[in-house]
Each structure stands twice: as structure tokens, then as C-alpha cells.
Image (tube, grey):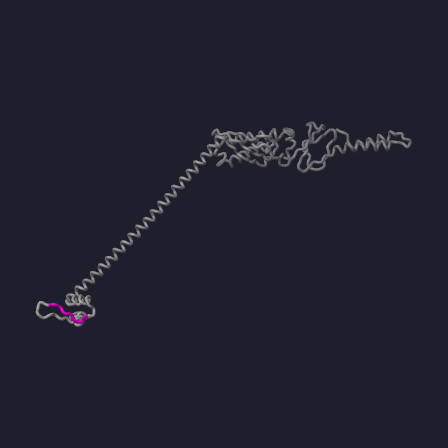
Amino acid sequence: MGSHPGGHRLCLFALALARTRGGKFRVAPLIGALLIGLVLITVGDGLVFINPEERGVVLSALSPTGYRSAALQPGLRWVVPYFESVRRYPISRQTYTMSVIAGEGQVRGDDSILARTVDGQEVSIDASVIYTIDPNKVVDVHIRWQDRYTDGLVRPLARGVIRDAVAKYKVEEVVSSQRATMVQTISEELTARMGREGLTMVDFILRNITFSKEYAASVEQKQVAQQQAEQAKYLVQKQQQEAERMRVEAEGIRDATITRAEGDAKSQVIRAKAEAEALQLVSEALKENPSLLTFRYIEKLAPNVGVILLPSSSSNPLLLDLKQLMSMAITPTAGTTP
């Protein structure tokens, strides 16, 4: 142990008490002051304050095992000076990061995990392990690992478990369909194995997966091919939709043409029937009134003519009274219904 400031002050105070009026020293007061100072220093050296985020392991020369079986809890504690000492261990969360980027992890430089998939592809894994020391197993951690539990346990254990997990999957599964399952497997394995060593695994974070340059190039080519295939599929679908549209449009035109033709045919039939019926009526009218045709002819020639002179084979010409002919055409003959 080094010199204690309080001890120096106590010695000076004892020398002052022991000095007589004549400048001589008295032995008894000096010895008493030194004993009191020694007791105070010893008691002060035995007081230890444990912070809330840590526990203390007591190394004791008074115990047959060399340590106390229970760790010191937070607060002001006392150990036997000169025979016992305290090793402090944090129980707060700690993070160990392994990264390909220098400065991100605990190890300078590339500290990523190189692993090989079941189909022989090499991948580089960046990961972080968040863990704590179990407060109830601090003494066990000290006995097994002391302050080497990070580099001696967490780092190699995490790297080994990650490699074993990656080796169960194909490279496509590692980055897509089975990634979550793989992370869960790693987390469960680390939790079990770290728990047996006195550490509690809080979380496992798979930060990044990097492929080899050759595989990355092949993946890129595959993605380009897939995009081209999707584009071709889209064009085919578009052409099919356009062909379907044209077919529907052609069917519509065809149906419209057929409908129009049918309408024209029906119209012609109706018109033909009407004309036939009209001719039939005209024929019947001519049979009953033979002079009607001559009248219609004359009417077309001169609508205002009342009397017309027609040539005849006899010496006397034929005179026709148009008004009489009209009255005859209008007046129904006997036996007909007006």
C-alpha cells in the first residue's frame, strides 16, 4: 500500500502533542497518537463503496477457498484491510461488435466473420452481441474468466456459433427466406452456451452480409435477367391485352354490321311489301276504273287542263272532260264500299 495522506497529518499531530514546553518530546502521547492514527487508517482502508451497476468479488486470505462465496452488493461495504481485496465487475449491458469496417468493432481493422454456406459460397458476416454478467454468477465468472470473458468467451463463441449456423443454409436462404430463422438459431445457441458460463445474452444483431465479388456479380446478372424476363412478360401481356381489345372491337364492328344489314334487309322487305300492296291496290283500282290511268297521265302533263282533245281513227276527234273523269275516279262504282 502507498502512503495515506491522513496518516501523514496524524503523525504531525501526534508529534505536536508529544512536544513539551521545553521543546522535548514525550513518548507516551506519541505512541498513543500513532496507535489511534493506525486504527483510523486501517478502518478507512477497509471501507468499499459498490456502485449500482457493478458487483464486487472479495479475494480473501482469511477464507479457505481464497474468496468470499457471495459478491458485494451496491452500497458501502467493509472488508478486512491487508487480508482482503475487491475486484469489481460491471453488470450493465455490454456490446461486442465484429465488423468489416475499421473502427466499428472492438478489434481494429476487419473483424467480420468469414463463413461458408452449405453450397460452398463464402460470405462475410457483421454482427453484434449484447450481453450482461449475471449478478448472481459474478463470482463464477471471476473464477473461470476473470476479466478475460469478452475476448476469451464472447468473441470466439459468437464467431463459432455464427459459422455453424451459416453452414446449414444455401447462400440464397442466408440473405432471404431463412435469414430470420438463422438469426433465431444463433440467438438461442448463444443464450444457452453463454448462460452456462455466467453471462446473459440480451440480443444478437446480424448487421450485414457481404458476398464474394464473383457471387455478387452473378447475383447482379441474375437480377438483370429477371428484370428483363419481367419486362418481356409485361410486353407479352400488353400485346395480349391489345389483341383482346382488337378482337372485342372487331366483334363489335361485326355485330354492328350484321345488325345494320339485318335492319336494311327488314326495311327492304317492308318496303317491298308496301310497294306490292300498293301495286295490288293500283291494279284493283285500274280494273274498276280503266280511265284512271289516262287521267293520271293527263294530270301529270297539265294539272290545270280541264278538257283534252285526243286523236281518233274516226273523222271526229275525241274530247275528254277531265272534271268528269276525276269525279268518276273519286266516285266508287256500284258494289264497292265507300
At horizontal 73% and vertical 32% (from top left) the residue drawn is 79
User: Is 171 on the left-hand or right-hand side of 286?
Assistant: right
Q: Quadrant of residue 56?
A: top right
The percent coordinates of residue 96 (x first, y second) are 60, 33
189 vs 337: above or below:
above
* Residue with the most extreme left position: 314
The percent coordinates of residue 109 (x first, y second) are 58, 30
User: Is 114 on the left-hand or right-hand side of 326?
Assistant: right
The percent coordinates of residue 1 (x first, y second) are 75, 28
308 magenta-colored: yes
225 vs 261: above or below:
above
At horizontal 12% and vertical 70% (from top left) the residue drawn is 318
The quadrant in which the C terminus is found is bottom left
The reply to whether residue 275 is in sight is yes
The reply to whether residue 195 is in sight is no
Specify the segment rendered in magenta: 305-311
User: Is 130 on the left-hand or right-hand side of 253?
Assistant: right
Viewer-closest of 95 and 231: 231
270 magenta-colored: no
